[in-house]
Amino acid sequence: SPIPSHLVFSTSLRCRLPVLLFVFQGVLLLIFVLFTTYDGHTDAASQPSDVDPAGNQLYAFFSLFQDIQLMLLVGLGLLLAFMKGYGVSAVAYNFLLSNFCMQWALIVQGFIYHYHEGKIHLGLYNLLTAEFATVAVLISAGAILGRTTSEWLILSYFQAVDIGGSVTVHVFSCYFGLGASIALYRSGLQTGHPKETPSYISDLLSLVGAIFLWVFWPSFVSVLVHPGDGQHRAVLHTWVALSASVLTTFAISSLLEKKGKVSMGHLQNATLAGGVAIGTVADMAINPGGAFLLGILSSLACILGFKYMTPFLANKLRIQDQCGIHNLHGLPGIIGAVAGIATILPPLQNATVEPVFIGETLGRSASQQALFQAVGLGVSVIISLVGGYLTGLLLKLPFLAQPPDQFCFDDELYFQIQKPLETLSVDQVDEDLQMPLKNKVGLP
Amino acid sequence: SPIPSHLVFSTSLRCRLPVLLFVFQGVLLLIFVLFTTYDGHTDAASQPSDVDPAGNQLYAFFSLFQDIQLMLLVGLGLLLAFMKGYGVSAVAYNFLLSNFCMQWALIVQGFIYHYHEGKIHLGLYNLLTAEFATVAVLISAGAILGRTTSEWLILSYFQAVDIGGSVTVHVFSCYFGLGASIALYRSGLQTGHPKETPSYISDLLSLVGAIFLWVFWPSFVSVLVHPGDGQHRAVLHTWVALSASVLTTFAISSLLEKKGKVSMGHLQNATLAGGVAIGTVADMAINPGGAFLLGILSSLACILGFKYMTPFLANKLRIQDQCGIHNLHGLPGIIGAVAGIATILPPLQNATVEPVFIGETLGRSASQQALFQAVGLGVSVIISLVGGYLTGLLLKLPFLAQPPDQFCFDDELYFQIQKPLETLSVDQVDEDLQMPLKNKVGLP
Amino acid sequence: SPIPSHLVFSTSLRCRLPVLLFVFQGVLLLIFVLFTTYDGHTDAASQPSDVDPAGNQLYAFFSLFQDIQLMLLVGLGLLLAFMKGYGVSAVAYNFLLSNFCMQWALIVQGFIYHYHEGKIHLGLYNLLTAEFATVAVLISAGAILGRTTSEWLILSYFQAVDIGGSVTVHVFSCYFGLGASIALYRSGLQTGHPKETPSYISDLLSLVGAIFLWVFWPSFVSVLVHPGDGQHRAVLHTWVALSASVLTTFAISSLLEKKGKVSMGHLQNATLAGGVAIGTVADMAINPGGAFLLGILSSLACILGFKYMTPFLANKLRIQDQCGIHNLHGLPGIIGAVAGIATILPPLQNATVEPVFIGETLGRSASQQALFQAVGLGVSVIISLVGGYLTGLLLKLPFLAQPPDQFCFDDELYFQIQKPLETLSVDQVDEDLQMPLKNKVGLP
């Protein structure tokens, strides 16, 4: 075995993962059996006899819900599979973690928002909001509890607007992740890890994953917008911003990189930046030109971040940002938040099409609402950084079995995959190239 | 050529496949031209002048129909591509077989259920029911006629309930396939085949295929449920069961496998078990907790099946279950059928939300209906085993050109794919790694 | 570096691509900001107070729009990734080009069809029609301006019928591409290029791409049909034609190829031919049998084209048809156009179900309309060939940086991808197989 037994012991999942999952599933089973029931859309008894079945909330959300599932599980899974020898882990852990978080969010959000008469009332809408909480976790690979608190503060307490999640999803999860990364810093990995490199096929699959995300991003941004013209604008704006990001990415990357060759990392990330930045203002009347501008600015910021900020964070501030989340989620998220503030401020308002903001019904002026939006952004950054840092300290506790440096980014540690090559022979190369070879089947 | 000519002759598709397909397409063309016409939803002449076009049945089914097409052709195709050197065959034959079966089912179901005034009346609904028949065939790779008989017996004669197909799709196709496998037993393959192993990339693609199936499974289970709250419950229950299966799979697999490493086979199969088990009861008021429990139990049964039952079947009963269909479809399907019986039996009924079962309108008591459900399960197992065995004997007839043992699981037998390595040189390794090499393009 | 500096200079994208894209994005940004606004479905101010939000045009198109996005970006991207060492370029340039064209088409079509009161009025419908224009460009990799002209002539001037784009999309883009290919002929590539070969994994991914296209093709054909029974017929016909194409492809390919082995190229193309041919008549009452026949004929023509016509074009007429677009789009598109003429001609009309054609409202007889259809086909072929040839000449201008022959079909020219093997050692083989190797991580 290539892994010495004393190391295997300390990183083995045999004890910790099953115990954690068994306890979690046991507790969840109890809660599901004792404390859940159907909501008004899934309960047969609460349907009036004259209700039109086609009006069930299911039909407003189901196809968008599945678009987002496909984004998270196939798109994000493949996007994260960009390191050679870590593809299976990326896809599989993304799958496990998203289910873990959705179950948790279903229950936590259920007890907070949907608990009455002794029961959590469940329907597709709950799955959808749990999915949104999970997106944040998958981005930061952090913990869900912190985000729920922050979301409540921003959306309920400050009544800030953030329909597509620029601040509550992207900015939050980015700084949460960076906070944890500060706590988890490993000096041994500062100069880069030998396995932290892509291969041809992992780069190709990662690009396909990014395109899945790109295609379904308008569903993600628009799903929680009120039906009608608002949702229609959100789809239009998101597509325009994403499309501007694609062309800008090719332009900037080709300009900045050696010999004009486009960087795969830029392609896999900055083409999505417009989707992050459009989040806060997606359904406002910002004009298609505003969306175009956001797409250009956000992918520009993203590539400059990869080029200059990530090395700076790693070398000077000792923050390791493995997947460049600060470039894809942090910077474009902040751009989106600023766009939200700018859109609400009076001077930019268009006489014929006024942006509708939630603050109007609270008797706030536009300037006051803009202030609350800014406060919401600041709160998100602070809570996420602190929460992430504390979570990182927690993850360093000895019983949580961190792998030693040399086993980072290695599928073989946690999955039964094909053995690596020990010696090189025709047969073995053939095996790994997945091709039949005549002398394997015992022909004369 | 690596394959001696006398072997090539006996397995060549040149005569048999084209002849079979030409005859089939010729007969189908005649039937389509002479015996098909449009149904009430596709016929322009039968639309009242005041009909709302948005109410056309197309809009109730189309997106779900395409979800299921994607499941079958991309999801199942990739899932089956887990053997190195057999990926192209898996995806391509899955594509061919699903079209063959859907055409056949369209005509057979058409003559039985939709034939009047001398014509089969076709619309999207026919495609959808043909798709369901095809799922069973793709699982068992058996024949469609048997299933149609069984389906008619279970659903029409016994009036049993099985909305998501736990019994009529999964249990049936599983035992049909095992029946055929008994007849097709090859002692030469008992100890395993050298090509019957996955590679890194085939394992990764197979996992992505499983996730496609996982994402769209709620569409599959809910598409035939009546619109409204029932369909909404089916979606909710299916998601909850599937999600519990994911966490349970990681937990059990990590617990049972060496060094706590999760098995790829478990991951690709047991995460879907909850979707199989929920089939019968998907739209009943079983409470989300019931769905959670079914997800846990079915993936537990699936993994234990892989660990202990598949070797037992192979060694003691000489039944080769290549893809573990008994673990993913047989055991969870039976769990689903039992759940259906338990849900209908009076003691488990909830006073406020009664399960609605088809038997009520027949004047049956709940116990009587439960009995009919149990009989339906038994009938499905018996007909499928016998039908599968007879089909297997049929497939052994000499003119059907079975490949010799050593060519099993080999793409090269039926497809023009890249030549295997004969000798090892830098150039050839490069070719197979799909990378350009400077000395290939004749630079100075 | 494997590429000599004097060659690198002449093909570097550093100057040309960024400059082109910056200028394009700058101009587009100006146009978006100055000349675009919302249409009646996206503008909040133009919604009557009693409007039903669920009736917004968004809901009629959005899921079909995304199906087509997935077809173009994932399906077509992967389908084109069939050459080893050119997969990243295929997917990435497909992504860039489709966004470039959609932005351009959005503006050009906007000024022509949706410009009033000094503004282009935008909504999802504009994105959809821009998407259709883009399909043609992606097929021919030609220029959008020509097609817009041709489309206007065929659909507006001749009032010809072509709902699913057999003529305006497939025939046009095919001959446009061939016209360009004539102008761009390279004698050095006549005997084939060493890199112009697939590998095992690229063939598999390309097949998966074809299946994505196959699954969503009914969305593409039906999206612009009027809602109701017509759209329902379009979906039914498209599925029937595509399915007949699959079985016919396996039959013919196995019959014609050596040892009865199915050709991957046939499988990746001819299975889609029925979808091309059904375009013109998709919503007419041609009977499902007519669709079946079109599926069979078109895939037969496609395979015969690959087998006999492509070599003839290359050797005798010096037209290089790299991806076989004449076989998949040209021949089946012409079959579709002829089917349209035959369906409209009186002798073939069915007394009970008359095809509705746009000419009726113009006071044309059926024969007159059939004539206009034929003229439309001829116009499409002529304009596209000439337009393509002129575009090809344009592309030969020296400042456009064509790569030298030996760098054609090579990812490394434009993307930062993994280095090719220079020497062969265990470590490097391991790297390219994407597998961890124990001696890489410095174990004792």
Image (spheres, coloured by chain):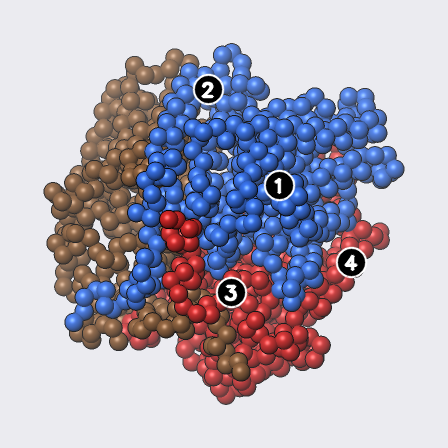
Chain colours: A blue, B brown, C red
Question: C233 or A14: which is nearer to us?
Answer: A14
**Residue B43 at x, y percent in the picture:** 49, 50
**Residue A76 at x, y percent in the picture:** 52, 45
**Residue that numbered label 3 is attached to:** C419
State the separation of the CA atoms marked 2 and 3: 57 Å
Q: Residue at x 63, y 30 (%)?
A: A384
Question: A251 or B149: which is nearer to us?
Answer: A251
Residue kind at label 2, given as amino acid type: Thr
The quadrant of the picture occupied by the N terminus of chain B is: bottom left
Residue kind at label 4, given as amino acid type: Gly
Residue kind at label 3, given as amino acid type: Lys
Residue neighbourhood size for the residue with mark 3, other residues' Cα within 10 Å, grouped as few (<14), some (14–19), many (≥20): some
Question: C132 or C6: which is nearer to us?
Answer: C6
State the separation of the CA atoms marked 2 and 1: 48 Å
The answer, for residue C43, to whether it is visible in the render is: yes
Work out whether mark 2 precedes mark 1 in sequence or the reverse, and give the earlier one: 2
Work out whether mark 3 precedes mark 4 in sequence or the reverse, and give the earlier one: 4
> Which chain letter goes with mark 3?
C
Judge from the rendering whether residue C250 lies leftward or rightward of residue B444; answer left or right.
Answer: left
State if disc 4 and disc 3 touch (CB < 8 Å): no
Mark 4 or 2: in front is: 4
Residue C403 appears in which quarter of the rendering? Answer: bottom right
**Residue that numbered label 4 is attached to:** C26
Tell me the number on the disc at residue A37: 2
Residue kind at label 1, given as amino acid type: Arg
State the separation of the CA atoms marked 4 and 1: 38 Å
Judge from the rendering whether residue C282 lies leftward or rightward of residue C396; answer left or right.
Answer: left
